[in-house]
Amino acid sequence: MPMILVRSVRDGYAFRAYHAPAKGARKGGLVLVQEIFGVTDHIRQLCDEYAADGYEVLAPSLYDRQERGFEADYTPEGIAEAMKLRDGHDMADSVGDVQSCIDRFRDASSDPVYVTGYCYGGSVAWVAACRCKYLAAASGYYGRAIVDYLDETPRCPVMLHFGKTDASIPPDWVDRIEAAHPEVQVFRYDAGHGFNSDRRKDYDMTSAELARQRTLAHFAAHRTTPPPRRDQFGNPV
């Protein structure tokens, strides 16, 4: 499927997004947020798989403002370049791009809209769940930066997935997330970081499939979009 252009509600920038139309009966829209490596063939494959499950999917290319069309592999050189872009990237831009995708879905349909994300995208999914309007539910995978945003409160039901042997996310960080937000479903798997990607050495098929089934069930259980929060004047915030 082709990349399409989506205009940011934050700064008007036209970023690219991979678009996978839903197969069969449409269940809703899904914003799928990339790893640090960009909208790679792995991310596109995930989009196609969710599309086969009935979700229309958009995967925004978050680094387009820095390097349009960036994709990296899992070599040390690729990881270093991806981390350089991530470290120079503004979380507010990522969340704004997610909101732009949400709005695009809502302009075309009244169906619910969801978000999921992996690695850096798992952190973005958490912040988007806290800041974005009109999300029905969120599912985030091994988001290392979630602990930096624990003072924020999700606007929609959230599910999180972590590997027990993830060297980049210590177990006590996951404990902190659970303690700060007992309303959030947190699952721990006998796996490491990136266990969902069959391109990575820490891929664990059993954990990946279980997390996927839990995510699909989570989305199916939340098919009503919560109303936006409103300020004292009744305006959405």
Image (spheres, rainbow, N blue to C red):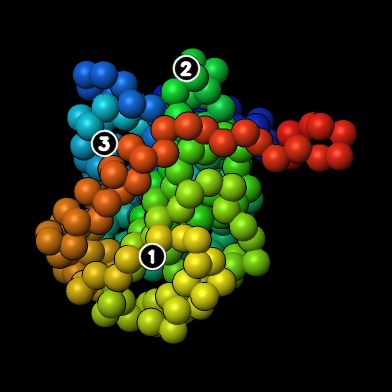
Tag nearer the camera, 3 or 1: 1
Vertical side of 51 occupied by 162: above or below: below
> Mark 2: few, some, or many residues within 10 Å (few <14, many ≥20)?
few
Q: Earlier in the sequence, mark 1 or mark 2?
A: 2
> Mark 3: few, some, or many residues within 10 Å (few <14, many ≥20)?
many
The disc at residue 50 is: 3
What residue is rendered at 35% in x and 31% in y?
Answer: 57
Residue occupied by mark 1: 186
Q: Amino acid at mark 1?
A: Val
Location of residue 222 in the rendering, given as x and y in whole percent from the top left corner: 41, 39
Q: Is residue 176 left or right of residue 29?
A: right
Q: Is residue 41 left or right of residue 61?
A: left
Q: Residue placed farthest to the top in the image?
A: 108
Q: Nearer the viewer, residue 30 or 80?
A: 30
Residue occupied by mark 2: 109
The disc at residue 86 is: none
Q: Nearer the viewer, residue 169 or 188?
A: 188
Q: Amino acid at mark 3?
A: Tyr
Question: Quarter of the image holding residue 97?
Answer: top right
Location of residue 237 in the rendering, given as x and y in whole percent from the top left corner: 74, 39
